[in-house]
Every structure is written in C-alpha cells, then in structure tokens.
Image (cartoon, coloured by chain):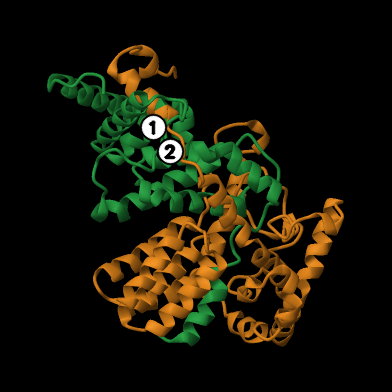
Amino acid sequence: MGHEVADAFLPLSDGRLGGRVGEGRARALVDAHLDFVWRVLRRLGVSAADVDDAVQQVFWVAVRKIAPQPTATDEAYLLGIAVRVASDCRRRGRRRRELVGVDPLDSPDPGQSPEEQLEFKRALVLADRILDSMPWELRVAFVLFEIEQKTTPEIAELLGIPLGTAASRLRRSREVFAQAVAQHRAHGGGNP
Amino acid sequence: MNDPPRLFDEHQGDLESVLLAAMRADRPPAGVRERVLAGLSRWAPAAALGFWTTSALAHAGPWTKVGLCLVAVGAVPASVAVVRSLDGVPTSTLPTSIEAARPPEAAVPTSHPGLAASPVDPAPAGVTTASAATSLPVGSASSGLGTGPSVAIAAVVAPTPERVAADAAEERLVASSAGAEPASSGAFPLVMPSTLDAEVAALHGVRRALDQGSPGVALQQLDRYGRTFPRGGLAFEAAVLRVQALVLQGDRAGAELLARSLLARSPDGPHARRIRTLLSWQQD
C-alpha cells in the first residue's frame, strides 16, 4: 500500500473526534470526570503506559456523543465507555503486562511525606495484584461498588445484567478480595 | 435490594480499608488533563467541516456532493463565524479551538440519553466527507484549496452493507434508549456507543494480524475499517496502526509520510510517543 491509499485514509482518520460539544462543555467534562475516569481505567487493569491513550479514547467518544448540557448521567455514560475501553486495553495488554512494582507514573498526594508516599504506592501495588487475580466480571463489580461507590442497582443497569447477577458478582468479588487479603496476612504481610 | 456495607466501612483500620483508601485516593499525574484537552481541541476544526459537508451531502446528488465538498473547504471560516454568532460572542474574542469549530448541536447523531431530537438528519450511510482538508488551521482553510479537492472527492464513498446495518442498529438503540431512560430521571443508564464494540473488534483484528506478522492483512482490515466506520471514534488509533503496518511491510516512505502527518496534527497527543517509536524503528 502506497501513499495514495495512506492519504486517502487520512480524511477518515481525523476530524471525527471532539465534534459535538463546545469547548466549555468538553473542558468541564474533563475537569469534572478526569480523576474518576483515570482511576476506573487503572483499577480495571489499564497499565500506566496505556492509561493516557485510554483516557483520551474515553473522552473522544464521549464528546462526540454526549448531551450538549451537563446531565446527571454524564458520569454513568463515561463509566460505561471506560469499562469497554479498559476491557479492550486489558486484552491487548496481556502480552506486555508491565512488571508489578512501584509505578513512577502514579502520583500520590504531593503533600505526603516520602514515607507516606511509599506506603501509598505499596498499598496500590498490593491492591492491583489482588484485583488482577479476580475474574474480569468480578473485578468490574468490585471496582464499581467498593471504589466508585455505586449501588448494586446502578451496577446492574450499567452492565446490562440482572440485579441478582450484579449482587452475586459483587458478593463473589468481595470473597475473593477477603481471601486475598487473608492470604497476604497469612504470609506475614501486614499493612503495606 | 439493600447493598452490603462497604468493606472500607466494615474494616476501618484494617488492611482492607488501607487498600481501598489507596485505590479511592489514586489520582492521575500532572499533565494528563492538559494532554486530554489538547487532544480534543486538535480535532475540533475537522469536526466543524464534517458537519457542514455531511449535512449538505445528505440531500445532494453525486456531482453536487463533489462540489459541496470543494466548497466546504472554504466554508470553515464561515461556519466558525456562524457558530460564534450563535453563541452570542464576538468572533474576535474566541480562540480557534473546540468552541470555534463547534458544529450546530443537532447535526450529529447521538446515542446519549437526554438529547433533544435532531432536527437535521445525519448523513446517509456511507456518505461521508473528507476531513483531511480540515487539518488546515481554521484561519487558513480558505487558502487550502490546493489540497482539498482530491481529498474531498476521494472520501465520497458508496454505502456498504455493514455501514447500513450499523446505522440501523444504532438508530434502534437510540430509539429504545430514548424511550426507556429520560435523562432528567437521574437514573443510571445503559447506553453505550453502539458501534464502539464493533470498532474495537475491528481494530483488535488488525492488531492480531500485526502480531502475527501479516501487515498486508492488517492493511486490508484497516481499509475495511475506514469504509465501515467513516466517522469512527477510534480512527486515529487506526491510523497509528496503519503506520505500524506500513513499517512492517517495508513501506518506509508511506509509513513516514503518514506518521509525520499524524504528528503534525497531534504533536503532543497520547499517541505521539508511540508514533515516534514507530518512526525510530523504521530508521533503525
């Protein structure tokens, strides 16, 4: 394939993004939900190296589709996109999963002391290890409930699953989490 | 149904609460917000042209479509002025960014709940517009006719069965979502971009082909992606994959041309590092 095809492709590869809402709305959307989107992507297993791309994808899709004015459903809408994007990143990232360790790209509160920052990062590493051990469906339920503090009905609606299924996934995910923490303790690990 | 108490509350002071507190407190590093906003604003001028040509093409014959595409290249400044005037803001006071290039809201089909019904129908399936011309800065669009025509002509494509099916599915989803979940209810909706899964799957196939060392197959799949999703939300990602495929295929000139074009459009975007890495690969 030569330049002709590449050039012809370019028109289709740009300009389709960021088109619906105004700058103010897009900026407000990012300001209001960036932390949340970023956190969900990271906790759903998107690596630090990929998370910028993933965040960008989420907002690209959102600004093309989202309502011109802020609505109560903005967060849920972004969350739905983030779960899909994270799922795709996870599949792609299996073969290049980063080494578990302190991630220089994660940023703790700058007001913390070095010791507190180290403790924070250790806790994140351990938490992510535990989340990595969960099946995907359980991980999503756990992150939405325990970290993003959604209710079970909200999770069921977001994921398009029956309420009972959401409750079951949540229960099992909490069991996995509790077992993993217990194992960590049993192997001599205290608080990170 | 009552939710169980959250572990963070149940296990105050325990390891569980420490882990959950850390996960809840995790924040993006400095600079992410700026990169995201920069990435969004870089593509906005193209979106403006996309509206003007798309909505016009919806009601035009084939030769008119070609002509409208040519005219549209020069229409960007006018569209910017119109949009700004709709906002009630003097044209000279706004930056040439997302706001400047914002298309009228009703023109873009949506799958998000709570949107007003669109008074202007979206373009018919398969009729799309070339927005490469819109990579020109807004202020210089009228002087960019030298690149516009060929691009515009190339991008008026025939509808494909896949595109027709995707549009029909999207319309059904939008209709059902609108009926089931008014935005003002504040309820938690299940409304996803209906084609996103298909786009992700298509690009997944491209990556698989690249992983298997089949750049030719990957390029064919990218061509199909471009035809099926002419307004794809993952189109930039697809273009980056095309660079990778061209590198693997040994088309250095093609890869470099496309890569430099992408970098020129988004020098600080989230894909910039990957594109530069690809460029460095082929120079090795």
Left or right, B68 with reference to A13 = right
List the single residue furthest toward the front: A114
Position of the C terminus of chain B, as image quadrant, is bottom left
Q: Which residue ends up furthest to the left in the rendered image? A: A187
> Which element type, helix, strand or loop, lies under badge 2?
helix
Above or below: residue B142 compared with residue A181? below
Q: Which residue is rendered at x = 52% and y = 81% of the image?
A: A7
Residue drawn at point x = 48 percent, y = 47 percent: A81
The hue used for chain B is orange
Q: Which mark is residue B179?
A: none
Colour displayed for chain A in the image of the structure: green
Three-letter amino acid code at the position of disc 2: Val
Chain of the residue under the numbered disc 2 shown in the image: A
Asked if residue B84 is positioned above or below residue A175 in the image, the reply reads below
Image x and y of residue A47, in percent: 34, 47
Contact (CB < 8 A) between labels 2 and 1? yes
The residue identified by callout 1 is A143
Q: Nearer the viewer, residue B223 or A23?
A: A23
For marks 2 and 1 on the same chain, the one whose residue lies earlier in the sequence? 2
> Disc 2 versus disc 1: distance between alpha carbons?
7 Å
Residue B126 lies, in percent from the top left, at 58, 74
Q: Secondary structure at mark 1?
A: helix
**Residue A127 placement (x, y as % from top left):** 30, 30
Q: Which residue is mark 2?
A: A40
